Amino acid sequence: MTETNFIPENLSNIQEKGACTWKSPSNIALVKYWGKSDPQLPKNPSISFTLDACHTITTLKFQEKKVQDQQFSFDVFFEGKKKEAFKPKIVSFFERIEVYMPFLKEYHFEIHSENSFPHSSGIASSASGLSAIALCLMSMEKLMNPSMEQAYFNQKASFLARLGSGSAARSIEGELVVWGVHPEVVGSSDLYGVTLEQDVHPVFKKYQDTILLVDKGEKVVSSTVGHQLMHQHPFAKQRFEQARQNLAVMLTVLKNGDLDRFVEIVESEALTLHAMMMTSMPYFILMKPNTLEIIQKIGAFRARTQLHVCFTLDAGANVHVLYPANEKKEVLEFIENELVVFCQKNHYICDSAGNGAKLLNEDALNATKLEKQ
Ligand code: PMV
């Protein structure tokens, strides 16, 4: 597959208006993506668990413009309120994907989104948010090309989502998704995410992720700036190579269920991500004192109990606590007793690996299907 495969050729069943709603999840990377080249191509492959509870629900309403012009026309609403501030990001997303969605300027859109997690919880909503819009646009394209196959639908949804926010490419399917070319993952691509097809040990089924909300504030550095700083980074080359090696080991671990090795790689990846931020010029530090307190406590608890709990981090201060489903009772007790005090307002979110995005209103879609005369 190359980019040109995603330029539609046979859009015949033109729609006058319609609407669709998708629920799309967030994801948490085990091997991290940090560093990219234009247009949103990763410098190294990454792998993530698709999440279940943390998601965005987006409804896209579309209506053919009465007078055609050369502008993108849309209104965006977040949790019921019009959000002008979200528009520039969506305009640049539309600009990037227009060649693959050539009908965009022919319609007026209304985009209505809401998140299952509190806004300003420090949880990045770009993966779930942009994958949800990408999926809605794909539903629209599918109406115009009803013979489109599901595999192509998912691949192109991931491809479009990636052009909005890199990690969003991993939010279409589940439970484990690889994005970026890796010699040991058949079909892997820099253009879109692919579900991991190999055998996965049952211990990783419904793997638990409890997200400790350490800092709900806005990020001090956008991930766009962070990725850019990898261009002149003194350790970039070694880092990209290390990620490739860690992914190779992770593939074996996911097969054989070696949780000790899993813990080692996941924690090292999280700390390496932050080490890259701390050693860029200018540097930035996204961890907070409570992030470190939690990390220390998790290490001590693991040593004491021999349980397989570990931490990972996104580009922020919150801590994702990962553990197998059969250790849930003990780990939740530990979180309640020892970690919750380090969370803002004692807040945390219980999540687990999930199966990917879902179309919520197929009926409405069919009901609004109109053939153009
Ligand atoms: O998708 P972006 O451009 O916001 O990049 C975020 C990348 C990390 O979340 C920090 C790591 C990852 O692989 O998800």
Image: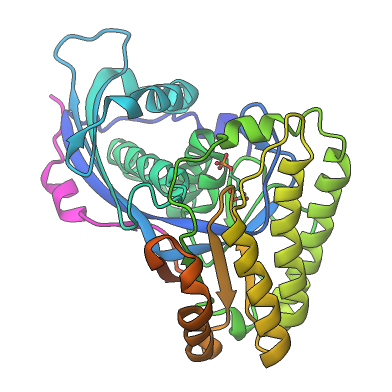
Residue 121 in the figure: left or right of residue 244: left
Determine if residue 197 is in view. Answer: no
Identified at 66% across, 44% down, the residue is 285
Residue 43 in the image: x percent, y percent? Answer: 74, 39
Q: Where 119 sits versus 195, above or below?
A: above
Q: Quadrant of the C terminus?
A: top left
Q: Position of residue 50 (x, y in %)?
A: 50, 62
Q: Is residue 354 visible?
A: yes
Vertical relation: 331 (above or below) 39? below
Magenta range is 357-373
Closest to the observer: 206 or 371? 206
Classify residue 232 as left or right of residue 18: right
For the N terminus, give its image quadrant.
Answer: top right
User: Is residue 302 highlighted in magenta?
Assistant: no
Quadrant in the rendering for residue 268: bottom right
Q: Nearer the viewer, residue 178 or 228?
A: 228
Residue occupying image coordinates x 48% and y 47%: 152
Q: Residue at x 52, y 74 (%)?
A: 339
Magenta span has 366? yes
Eyeballing the image, is 206 above or below 287? below
Front-most of residues 144 and 43: 43
Q: Position of residue 252 (x, y in %)?
A: 77, 73
Callout count: 0
